[in-house]
Structures are given as structure tokens and as C-alpha cells.
Image (cartoon, rainbow, N blue to C red):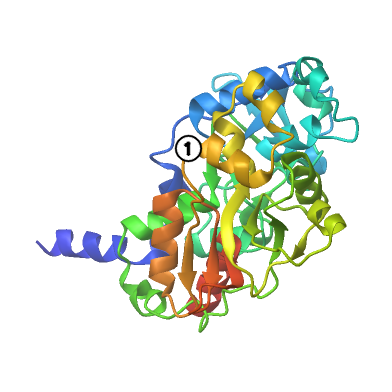
Amino acid sequence: MQQEKSEEDHHSRLINVTAKDLTAGNRRLVEVPYTATISHAMNTLVANSISALPVAAPPGHWIGAGGSMIMESDKQTGVVRKHYIGILTMLDILAHIAGEDSDLSDLDRKMGSQVSSIIGHCLEGLSLWTLNPNTSFLECMEVFGKGIHRALVPVESSIESSNTIAGVELIESASAYRMLTQMDLLRFLRDHHFDDLKTVLSRSISDLKAVHDSVYAITERTTVSSAINVMKGALLNAVPIVHAPDVPQEDHLQLINGRHRKVIGTFSATDLKGCRLPELQTWLSLTALEFTEKATGKERDVVSCGVEATMEEAIEKVVNRGVHRVWVMDQQGLLQGVVSLTDIIRSLRSALL
């Protein structure tokens, strides 16, 4: 009985959780070779319902993203079989499709390019991290609270313990990896009720300083192509679509200040996950609002909360709806700010410390 009680105490404390626990239920890594076409990579993303995947190449031919040397090696012999050279995200594919020479009739040729040619179109694809399996939950929070969206965690690490700041490694060789994301972290928190988190989760997002006041938006007249190009430039994966009848024509081609405006939709890179090529070809010239309704099959679906929402409510919304941010509204339903997964993790960690 005493043994059972102490095990229960162990698991009810966040301090005892490691990266290995966080990835225990995750499937083996979904990846593509560097020679895969963009079309094949997009099909892989769609089939697995994910928005990013690592790109693998033979060892010794490439410099990894950010100078990383993350290798997969044979479990028995330790011989290196492949080198992960970067992360391919949905936004990379979008930026490639809607690039400077966005001749939509040439979409087949663009989708036939090798994935290695577009890694790093967007900044996120250039960062590739691993976390030691023994990295503590708080150290994982430190990494993800700085805006790193995902990291590879070796199933068995060749490195004894994390020997760099907050467990981030740029060199690792293991026989297998699993992906750990910001969403995994928050899903774990939602599913496990930790005693040392109860008080923090009951505080409001405003009180915890999780709300970003500045929020960029596009208008109801911004086309998909324009939206993708401005998102790429600002390193954004999603933007609110706002009602802006008062802005001049040229402002529909760029990001505007969304504060105090009515949100009528969200345009997100992940909305394209369900698209087939023929549809994409015809949809790029639509407005982002029309596209969102066609692609998601949901009318103007906006995930939002009030400024006084609790942290627990914010986590519940992002995890249940599978989104990476919540728009924050005032009592009149006008946009006040945004809370991203990075903001949630950063402010939670800060409050816990």
C-alpha cells in the first residue's frame, strides 16, 4: 500500500517527468528522403495528419540545419545509416507554391521538385534539435518556450545526460527517434492532473502575461497567394482574417494591425493539409476567407477566448481543437491579442519557477 502511494506521488509531480515520458506513446518518426518530391512529402503530411516532418539524407553529403549532426545509426553495429538535414513544414511547401514566379499553371512542375531544394524557405525548417530522453519537463518547457516548435528525442540516447543548455543537442546518434512537439507537452499537461500545477492553471492568461498585444492580420479581401507571401515574410504559420472595409486597396496585399477589429476567420498553413493538387491550382487565387471555408468545410471557424480566460481553458482549447494559437477578444468580440503555444509554455514555466 505504501509502495503504491509513493508511486502515485511520484507521478503526480511534474518535476519527475522527462522527455522520455512525454514521447512514450508517440509513434516512430515519420520522415521523407531528401530525393522525395514535394508532392510526395505533402501526401505524407496529409496521410499522417502532421504539419512538419524531418528530411533524411545519406551521411557525409550534407550539413544539417543549424549545423546539426543528428544521425540514425544501426542498433547493433553503431554504423551511421542516415543524417537528418532539416525539417520540412507545410509553410515551406506553401511558400514554394506561391513564390515570386507563382505561375499557377506550372504547379505540377513545382510539386515535382525535390524537398531538399526548399528546406529553409521558412526559418523554422533551418532549425533541427534533439532533446536527451532524460531532459526534465521544466527544461523541455524552457526550449519550447523560446519558440522551438519540435525536437527529436532518441528512443535510446548515446549521450548520458543533457550536457548543453536546457538539454538541446546539436549532435546525436541513435538507432531511432520520436518527435516531441509543443502540442505534445500541452496534451500531456491536460491529460495528467499535476498537484504542483493546479494553482497556476486556475490563473488567467492576462495575469500570467501570456497574451501578445500586437497581432498581425489579413483582410477579407486578401488572396491566398498574398497571404502566404506575407506570412512567409513575417514567419507566421497562421493569421486572423479581419473585417476591414476602411483600409485602402494596397493594404489588402499586406499584414495590417488586427487589434480592435472583428475576426471573421483564421488562415493557417495547416488548412492546406487536406488539399489535392487540382484543388490547390484553382484555390490560390481565391480570397483567404473563401479558401478557408472550402478547405476546412467549416464556416469561419474561429478559436477564441476572453482576456480573463484561465490558463486551463486556453490549454483545453488548443489541445481539443488542434490549433496553435487562440485569438483573445474583448467583451464586444473585437480582437485584443493572441496566445500561442510558445506563450502558454513560456508563461507557465515562468509561473512555476
Amino acid type at circle 1 is Gly
Instruction: Name the secondary structure under disc 1.
Output: loop
Residue placed under numbered mark 1 in the picture = 297
- Can the viewer see residue 139 in this picture? no
Q: In this view, does 10 lie to the left or right of 289?
A: left
Where is 61 relative to 92, above or below? above
Q: In this view, does 248 lie to the left or right of 154?
A: right
| Residue 60 x %, y % | 82, 23
Which one is in front, 350 or 253?
253
Which one is in front, 200 or 11?
200
- Can the viewer see residue 40 in this picture? yes
Extreme residue toward the front, this view:
245
| Residue 71 x %, y % | 68, 30
Where is 161 relative to 119, above or below? below
Where is 338 relative to 234, above or below? below
What's the residue at 55%, 73% (across, down)? 347
Quarter of the image where the N terminus is located: bottom left
